[in-house]
Image (spheres, rainbow, N blue to C red):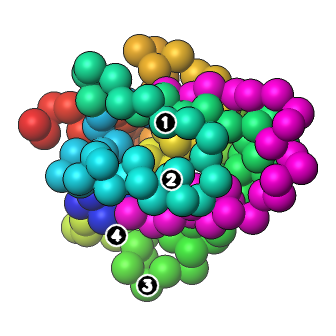
């Protein structure tokens, strides 16, 4: 299920990079390392090629399978803006979706490291609506990493609480949840 979200994230990255002009590339560089987890099941050389074709200045394939991206500061700022817009659209989509009927509201902090999903407890307990956490978590992790979070110390917590009582029903911490499923 996690892989379902990888391609859209990479396509978003590519679109954002392609939108930046050549003049912006001279303003300084930002380096970002993305863990191997985000590239599982993908041809890494193809990922690198697509990113370079999208305007990323340099990509380093690290021994641990992670990739380090080098880009101009203006490109990075534009990308962060696009990532934020993508997360907000994802939140709205989940709230409006018939796929997650128990979800009533979603709130988040500024760094997208924590999402609180308010649900109808009865509907939630008889559904697979915890799957909503995957998209929130992956986009939140991606945002944090591109915003400078330490590749060894980044987390996204998704808290499901009862809309009526505020009782915490379930808490999922990513990427820990993804690593447990390996």
Assign the C terminus to one quadrant of the image: top left
- Residue 143 placement, left or right of 129: right
In the rendered image, residue 110 lying in the magenta stretch gets the answer no
**Nearer to the camera, 116 or 155:** 155
Q: How many marks?
A: 4
Of marks 1 and 2, which one's residue comes earlier in the chain? 2
- Residue 24 placement, left or right of 136: right
**Nearer to the camera, 5 or 90:** 5
The span shown in magenta is: 7-33
SS state under label 4: helix
Res. 123 mark? 4
Q: Residue at x 40, y 73 (%)?
A: 100
x, y percentage for residue 19? 75, 64
Extreme residue in the bottom direction: 98
x, y percentage for residue 1? 24, 60
Of marks 3 and 2, which one's residue comes earlier in the chain? 2
Disc 2 versus disc 4: nearer the observer: 2
Of marks 4 and 3, which one's residue comes earlier in the chain? 3
Tag 3 near tag 2, CB within 8 Å: no
Question: Disc 3 designates what residue?
Answer: 98
Q: CA distance from mark 1 to mark 2?
A: 8 Å
């Amino acid at each position: 299920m996690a892989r379902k979200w990888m391609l859209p994230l990479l396509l978003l990255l590519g679109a954002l990079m392609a939108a930046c002009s050549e003049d912006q590339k001279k303003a300084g560089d930002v380096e970002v390392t993305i863990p191997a987890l985000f590239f599982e099941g993908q041809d890494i050389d193809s990922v690198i090629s697509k990113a370079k074709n999208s305007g990323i200045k340099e990509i380093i394939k690290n021994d641990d399978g992670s990739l380090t991206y080098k880009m101009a500061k203006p490109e990075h700022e534009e990308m962060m803006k696009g990532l934020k817009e993508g997360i907000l659209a994802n939140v709205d989509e989940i709230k409006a979706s018939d796929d997650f009927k128990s979800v009533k509201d979603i709130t988040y902090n500024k760094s997208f490291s924590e999402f609180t999903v308010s649900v109808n407890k009865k509907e939630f307990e008889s559904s697979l609506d915890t799957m909503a956490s995957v998209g929130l978590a992956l986009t939140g992790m991606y945002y944090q990493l591109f915003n400078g979070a330490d590749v060894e110390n980044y987390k996204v917590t998704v808290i499901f609480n009862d809309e009526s009582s505020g009782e915490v029903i379930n808490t999922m911490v990513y990427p820990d949840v993804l690593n447990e499923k390996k």
